[in-house]
Amino acid sequence: MKSAWEDRYYCRKCGAMSVIPPWKEKTCKYCGSNVYPFPEECDKFSREEYDKLKEYIREKYVMTSPEFNQRSAQFREKIQAEGRAIDAARDAAKAAGKTTSPSGSPKVECPYCHSTNTKKISTLSKAAHTYMFGIFSMSRNSKNFHCNKCGADF
Ligand SMILES: [Zn+2]
Ligand SMILES: [Zn+2]
């Protein structure tokens, strides 16, 4: 049986979870450390239980790992929180009827998790990303969209 969690990887250093297509380098986009495929036992979780599964993996596999680094985890959480804050601000602006922002591109569906919670990667964020993550992020520059749900670039 094909696993529901194929192409999902977790980072033992910072606890990040992401979808990484087979042709991409298996490194954490937050801390640059190696990532590992979801353990087989994850199949007992359904897709709807992804949040629960994330907690489970963090508790059982990440926190107990000698690679786990609290500061890396905090750094990742900070970046994710900032991402959510930006999304919330955009949603608020949209709700207020200000749909004229340059990022107001049509919704694009994520090819991995089929969420429409995606955003166009702007030239500025590409540059900032390259600045922060250096050579590891070069491949990202050929991608135009980012999925806010599963974190994939495509
Ligand atoms: Zn990491
Ligand atoms: Zn996705």
Image: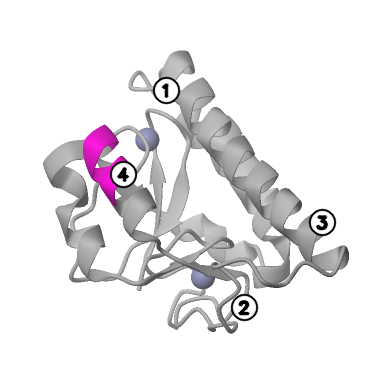
Q: CA distance from mark 1 to mark 2?
A: 29 Å
Q: CA distance from mark 2 to mark 4?
A: 22 Å
Which residue in the protein does label 3 denote? 92
Tell me the residue at 47%/49% (across/down). 17
Q: Is residue 32 visible?
A: no
- Nearer-N-terminus badge (2/3): 3
Residue 5, position in %: x, y? 48, 67
Which residue in the protein does label 2 denote? 116
Q: CA distance from mark 2 to mark 3?
A: 17 Å
Q: In which quadrant of the rendered image does the N terminus lie?
A: bottom left
Mark 1 residue CB less than 8 A from any atom of ligand 1: yes
Q: Which is more toward the observer, 46 or 103?
A: 103
Decide: few, some or many residues near mark 1? Use Cα within 10 Å; few <14, some 14-19, many ≥20.
some
Start-end of magenta stretch? 127-132
Which residue in the protein does label 1 denote? 72
- In the rendered view, tell whether residue 88 sits above or below residue 68: below
Residue furthest right in the image: 96
Decide: few, some or many residues near mark 4? Use Cα within 10 Å; few <14, some 14-19, many ≥20.
some
- Nearer-N-terminus badge (3/4): 3
Decide: few, some or many residues near mark 3? Use Cα within 10 Å; few <14, some 14-19, many ≥20.
few
Contact check, label 1 and label 3, Cβ < 8 Å? no
Q: Is residue 130 part of the magenta span, yes or no?
A: yes
Q: Which is more toward the observer, 118 or 52?
A: 118
| Residue 129: assigned label | 4
Q: CA distance from mark 1 to mark 3?
A: 30 Å
- Nearer-N-terminus badge (1/3): 1
Which corner quadrant of the image does residue 8 belong to? bottom left
Residue 55, position in %: x, y? 65, 41
Contact check, label 2 and label 4, Cβ < 8 Å? no
Ligand 1 image-quadrant field: top left
Decide: few, some or many residues near mark 2? Use Cα within 10 Å; few <14, some 14-19, many ≥20.
some
